[in-house]
Image (cartoon, rainbow, N blue to C red):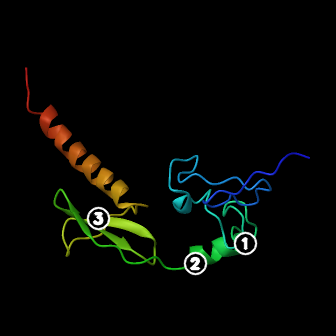
Amino acid sequence: MGAERPLGPGRVYAGDPLGEVMSPRCVHGFPTEHCSQCRICPHGLATSRCGRCNNAVAQRAAAKRTPDAQPAEEHRGFEIFFVPQERSWYFRKDADAELSRESYRSAFQARLAINAALDQAAEPARAGGKKN
């Protein structure tokens, strides 16, 4: 057989029979311990490959947990806030105003919706200003 490679001072790739040393960054450009695809699970495998860590039951259990409350934001005079039970973001003009009819998956999407609504409301005013 071939000569064995000596183990370096770093960590070893999960399941690598040759014992190659891991680089500090993964192929995705992140530190290896922060990358969900490359980090090593307690079973000695890449987390994305481990059947015990990455199974449907564990994913469903995680999906049932209520997420933590998020701080409310202000954008262009509107309040954007998170409803943990619905896992949704909403916006409203002020605390006494009615909720938006639509819900959003992120605060970013709610900001885009506010921008679109305000820009759409401003469009007819600009179009009607000029008369020939």
In this rendering, the answer to whether 22 lies above or below 120 is below
Label 1 vs 2, first from the N-terminus: 1
Query: Which amino acid type corresponds to the residue marked 1 in the rendered image?
Result: His
Asked if residue 38 is positioned above or below residue 123 in the image, the reply reads below
Give the class, few, some or many, for how many residues have Cα within 10 Å of label 1's Cα (few <14, many ≥20). Answer: few
- Tell me the quadrant of the picture where the C terminus can be found: top left
- Element at label 2: helix
Amino acid type at image mark 2:
Lys
Give the labeled residue for mark 2: 64
At horizontal 72% and vertical 60% (from top left) the residue drawn is 49
Location of residue 126 (image quadrant):
top left
Q: Nearer the viewer, mark 1 or mark 2?
A: 1
The local secondary structure at tag 3 comes to strand
Q: Residue 24, position in %: x, y?
A: 53, 54
| Residue 26 spot, x, y in % from top left | 57, 50
State the residue position of label 1.
43
Label whose residue precedes the other's in the sequence (3 or 1): 1
Query: Which numbered disc covers residue 110?
Result: none
Q: Residue at x 13, y 39 (%)?
A: 125
Nearer-the-camera pick, 77 or 31: 31
Element under disc 1: loop
Furthest toward the top, the residue is 132
- Name the one closer to the observer, 99 or 88: 88
Residue under label 3, please give it: 91
Compute the Cα span from label 2 to label 3: 24 Å
Left or right, 102 with respect to 8, comes to left
At label 3, the amino acid type is Phe
